[in-house]
Image (spheres, rainbow, N blue to C red):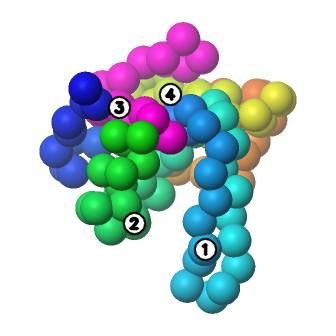
Amino acid sequence: MPLEIADKDLGGARVRLTFQTIQKNGSTRRFKPNEQLSAEDVLAWPMANRRALVSAGYIEIYPRQFVGRQAIQKGDRFVVQVRKDQYNVIEGRRINDQPLSREDAEELAKK
Protein backbone atom coordinates (compact mmCIF):
# COMPACT_ATOMS: atom_id res chain seq x y z
CA MET A 1 0.00 0.00 0.00
CA PRO A 2 1.45 3.43 -0.98
CA LEU A 3 2.47 5.88 1.70
CA GLU A 4 -0.16 8.54 2.43
CA ILE A 5 1.34 11.94 3.30
CA ALA A 6 -0.52 15.21 3.87
CA ASP A 7 0.35 17.92 1.33
CA LYS A 8 1.89 20.11 4.04
CA ASP A 9 4.23 17.26 5.07
CA LEU A 10 5.29 16.19 1.58
CA GLY A 11 9.05 16.47 1.04
CA GLY A 12 9.18 15.27 -2.55
CA ALA A 13 9.23 12.09 -4.59
CA ARG A 14 11.51 9.70 -6.41
CA VAL A 15 10.59 8.49 -9.88
CA ARG A 16 10.53 4.68 -9.95
CA LEU A 17 9.28 4.03 -13.51
CA THR A 18 9.63 6.09 -16.69
CA PHE A 19 6.59 8.18 -17.63
CA GLN A 20 5.86 11.44 -19.39
CA THR A 21 3.46 14.31 -18.95
CA ILE A 22 2.07 16.87 -21.37
CA GLN A 23 2.55 20.45 -20.19
CA LYS A 24 -0.11 23.16 -20.60
CA ASN A 25 1.94 24.67 -23.46
CA GLY A 26 1.77 21.34 -25.36
CA SER A 27 5.35 20.24 -24.72
CA THR A 28 6.10 16.91 -23.07
CA ARG A 29 8.32 16.14 -20.12
CA ARG A 30 9.84 12.71 -19.61
CA PHE A 31 10.58 11.49 -16.09
CA LYS A 32 13.21 8.78 -15.63
CA PRO A 33 13.86 6.34 -12.77
CA ASN A 34 15.69 7.75 -9.72
CA GLU A 35 14.94 11.35 -10.71
CA GLN A 36 14.13 13.39 -7.60
CA LEU A 37 11.07 15.64 -7.63
CA SER A 38 10.50 18.53 -5.25
CA ALA A 39 7.32 18.83 -3.21
CA GLU A 40 6.28 21.72 -5.48
CA ASP A 41 6.71 19.52 -8.58
CA VAL A 42 4.49 16.82 -7.08
CA LEU A 43 1.88 19.22 -5.65
CA ALA A 44 1.53 20.93 -9.06
CA TRP A 45 -0.23 17.81 -10.37
CA PRO A 46 -3.95 17.37 -9.69
CA MET A 47 -4.62 15.13 -6.68
CA ALA A 48 -6.14 12.34 -8.82
CA ASN A 49 -3.07 12.22 -11.09
CA ARG A 50 -0.73 12.20 -8.10
CA ARG A 51 -2.57 9.33 -6.46
CA ALA A 52 -2.64 7.36 -9.72
CA LEU A 53 1.15 7.76 -10.16
CA VAL A 54 1.77 6.63 -6.57
CA SER A 55 -0.70 3.73 -6.74
CA ALA A 56 0.74 2.45 -10.03
CA GLY A 57 4.29 2.66 -8.65
CA TYR A 58 5.54 5.39 -10.98
CA ILE A 59 6.59 7.66 -8.12
CA GLU A 60 7.46 7.09 -4.48
CA ILE A 61 6.65 10.05 -2.24
CA TYR A 62 8.46 10.85 1.00
CA PRO A 63 7.92 13.22 3.93
CA ARG A 64 9.94 16.38 4.61
CA GLN A 65 12.10 14.67 7.24
CA PHE A 66 13.34 12.01 4.75
CA VAL A 67 17.09 11.42 4.54
CA GLY A 68 17.80 8.92 1.76
CA ARG A 69 20.83 6.80 1.01
CA GLN A 70 22.05 9.38 -1.50
CA ALA A 71 21.41 12.41 0.72
CA ILE A 72 24.13 14.14 2.71
CA GLN A 73 22.82 16.20 5.60
CA LYS A 74 24.02 19.82 5.84
CA GLY A 75 22.10 21.31 8.78
CA ASP A 76 18.49 21.55 7.60
CA ARG A 77 19.49 21.24 3.93
CA PHE A 78 20.17 18.05 2.01
CA VAL A 79 22.24 17.41 -1.10
CA VAL A 80 20.44 14.80 -3.23
CA GLN A 81 21.83 13.18 -6.36
CA VAL A 82 19.32 13.39 -9.24
CA ARG A 83 21.51 12.17 -12.11
CA LYS A 84 25.10 11.16 -12.60
CA ASP A 85 27.21 14.10 -11.37
CA GLN A 86 24.12 16.31 -10.86
CA TYR A 87 22.67 17.27 -7.49
CA ASN A 88 19.81 19.28 -5.98
CA VAL A 89 19.75 21.02 -2.62
CA ILE A 90 16.59 20.31 -0.64
CA GLU A 91 15.27 22.38 2.25
CA GLY A 92 11.70 21.13 2.44
CA ARG A 93 11.71 21.92 -1.30
CA ARG A 94 14.33 22.14 -4.02
CA ILE A 95 16.14 25.49 -3.65
CA ASN A 96 18.24 25.42 -6.83
CA ASP A 97 16.69 26.02 -10.28
CA GLN A 98 18.87 23.57 -12.22
CA PRO A 99 20.88 20.52 -11.09
CA LEU A 100 24.33 21.48 -9.77
CA SER A 101 27.74 19.86 -9.54
CA ARG A 102 28.42 18.18 -6.21
CA GLU A 103 30.79 20.98 -5.16
CA ASP A 104 28.29 23.74 -6.02
CA ALA A 105 25.46 21.86 -4.29
CA GLU A 106 27.52 21.39 -1.11
CA GLU A 107 28.47 25.08 -1.16
CA LEU A 108 24.81 26.12 -1.53
CA ALA A 109 23.80 23.74 1.27
CA LYS A 110 26.27 25.44 3.64
CA LYS A 111 24.76 28.91 3.13
Query: Element type at marker 2?
Result: loop
Q: Position of residue 1 (x, y in %)?
A: 25, 26
Amino acid residing under circle 3:
Tyr
Mark 4 or 3, which is nearer the eye?
A: 3
In this rendering, the answer to whether 31 lies above or below 103 is below
- In the picture of the structure, the residue carrying the numbered disc 2 is 44
Q: Between residue 22 and residue 99, name the one nearer to us.
A: 22
- In the picture of the structure, the residue carrying the numbered disc 3 is 62
Q: Position of residue 5 (x, y in %)?
A: 20, 38
- In the picture of the structure, the residue carrying the numbered disc 1 is 22
Q: Are discs 4 and 1 less than 8 Å apart at CB?
A: no
Residue at point 76% right, 28% down?
102
Q: Earlier in the sequence, mark 4 or mark 1?
A: 1
Q: Earlier in the sequence, mark 4 or mark 3?
A: 3
Amino acid residing under circle 1:
Ile
Q: Position of residue 106 (x, y in %)?
A: 66, 28
Q: Are discs 4 and 3 less than 8 Å apart at CB?
A: no
Q: Is residue 46 left or right of residue 14?
A: left
Instruction: Give neighbour class at mark 1: few <14, some 14-19, many 20+ (Cα, 10 Å).
Output: few
Q: Position of residue 16 (x, y in %)?
A: 56, 33
- In the picture of the structure, the residue carrying the numbered disc 4 is 78
Mark 4 and mark 3: span between their CA atoms?
14 Å
> Quarter of the image containing the C terminus?
top right
Mark 4 or 1, which is nearer the eye?
A: 1
The residue most toward the front is 56
Mark 2 or 4, which is nearer the eye?
A: 2
Q: Earlier in the sequence, mark 1 or mark 2?
A: 1
Query: Element type at marker 4?
Result: strand
Q: Earlier in the sequence, mark 2 or mark 4?
A: 2
The span shown in magenta is 57-73
Q: Is residue 32 left or right of residue 72?
A: right
Q: Verify whether residue 65 appears in magenta.
A: yes
